[in-house]
Image (tube, rainbow, N blue to C red):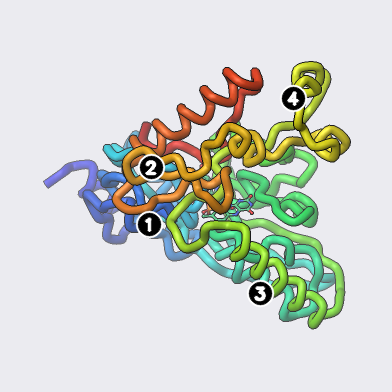
Amino acid sequence: MDKNLQQLESLIGKKVQIDVLLAKYTTFKIGGPAKYFFVAKDNEDLVRAITFAKRLKITFYVLGGASNVLVSDQGFNGLIIINKAKDIIFKKDNKVVADAGANLMELVNETVAKGLIGLEWAAGIPGTVGGATRGNAGAYGGQISDNLIGCEIMRGSKQFILDKKNCDFGYRDSIFKHNNDLIISVEFLLQKGDKVALQNKIKQILAERRDKQPLEFPSAGCVFKNVFIDSTNEEKIKQIGNLPKEYLERKKIPAAWLIEQLDLKGKNIGGAQISDKHANFVINIGKATANDVIQLISLVKMKVRDTYGIELMEEIEYVGF
Ligand SMILES: Cc1cc2nc3c(=O)[nH]c(=O)nc-3n(C[C@H](O)[C@H](O)[C@H](O)COP(=O)(O)OP(=O)(O)OC[C@H]3O[C@@H](n4cnc5c(N)ncnc54)[C@H](O)[C@@H]3O)c2cc1C
């Protein structure tokens, strides 16, 4: 028997699985096997798994809902930890603390049920609070950092609270994308509001998502970040003849618009396709491989670069490449 596996299991004190196909866990339904695979049911499991993986020098990767990742066809040659720690605790003064493994939509529903404003914009975003915090997930004018006040993290072997000001949040960005901090839980400060109005807003957002996004196919949501207009690219961007004025005013071009201009909607490689419904979604139309998706992403990046001189950046994260 594998010595690493034996040691890991005895240190964690729980079963660690081997050769688990990750396609089953990713929203893309793509991904090869994880050499070792552990589901953390609570924060104690999570911290133990990471502590002992480090001690045994086993490469590890934490996944929440696996809704923002492309996992390689070769899988991951180390330990995949799925974070299912899911406590949500309401405190006084409209504060709520959610485990990083809590489902974001569940947090939205629970806060709205208490008539608390601040997270309703996140309705329909799959995945966990931890994944959303790392990527500073956003939609419909909101982003996770808006109401976040701090995160309990593990850095090295130390666990402590990192205040929002030290989380370096930006557009789909945070300090956690640039270091190996593990987010354990996240605290939000919300406001009292009207429950029925919030529930209606959620209904409206979910309907709009169904209307505009190809939710009937597996995907990882938007593949590329939108493009911000600043002094480094403004001159080049102003030369795009048919650029809608409002993009210049808002200083932001949706990546989907650029892809649409290049007639790439519906383009497929193998089982991966640029959605007809939303050009920033790559969908798995059946048996797509990570390699198909990579080729499609490369094609889009090349065409956008050649035509507009703009470098699209991925919003999704690559695992096992
Ligand atoms: C249909 C669809 C719609 C979507 N719509 C949106 C949208 O509107 N806005 C948006 O921003 N995103 C959207 N997404 C993308 C995705 O759902 C979000 O980015 C989500 O917040 C990712 O959370 P997750 O738990 O699935 O992260 P995962 O995919 O599991 O992980 C993403 C990254 O976060 C890291 N991570 C996960 N947990 C932790 C932790 N506890 N500590 C440190 N790092 C961690 C992982 O290691 C990985 O690098 C959409 C995706 C889909 C499939």
Determine the image quadrant of residue 70: top left
Disc 3 secondary structure class = helix
- Residue placed at 73% from the left, 40% from the top? 169
- The mark nearer the N terminus, 1 or 3, is 1
Q: Is residue 216 above or below residue 267?
A: below
Q: Crowding near pointer 3: few (<14 within 10 Å), some, many (20+)?
A: some
The three-letter code of the residue at mark 1 reads: Tyr
* 176 left or right of 65 in image: right
Between 28 and 246, the residue placed more toward the observer is 246
- Residue placed at 27% from the left, 37% from the top? 74
User: Percent x, y for residue 13?
Assistant: 31, 59
- Residue placed at 62% from the left, 58% from the top? 212
Question: Mark 3 = which residue?
Answer: 109
Mark 2 and mark 3: Cα distance apart in space: 29 Å
User: Percent x, y for residue 110?
Assistant: 67, 76
Question: Mark 4 = which residue?
Answer: 240
Question: Mark 1 = which residue?
Answer: 25
Q: For ligand 1, tell me if the residue under mark 4 lies within 8 Å.
A: no
Between 67 and 247, the residue placed more toward the observer is 247
Numbered badge on residue 71 = 2
Q: Crowding near pointer 1: few (<14 within 10 Å), some, many (20+)?
A: some
Between 304 and 134, the residue placed more toward the observer is 304
Q: Are marks 4 and 3 in contact (CB under 8 Å)?
A: no
* 228 left or right of 216 in image: right
- The mark nearer the N terminus, 2 or 4, is 2
Q: Which of label 4 and label 3 is nearer to you?
A: 4
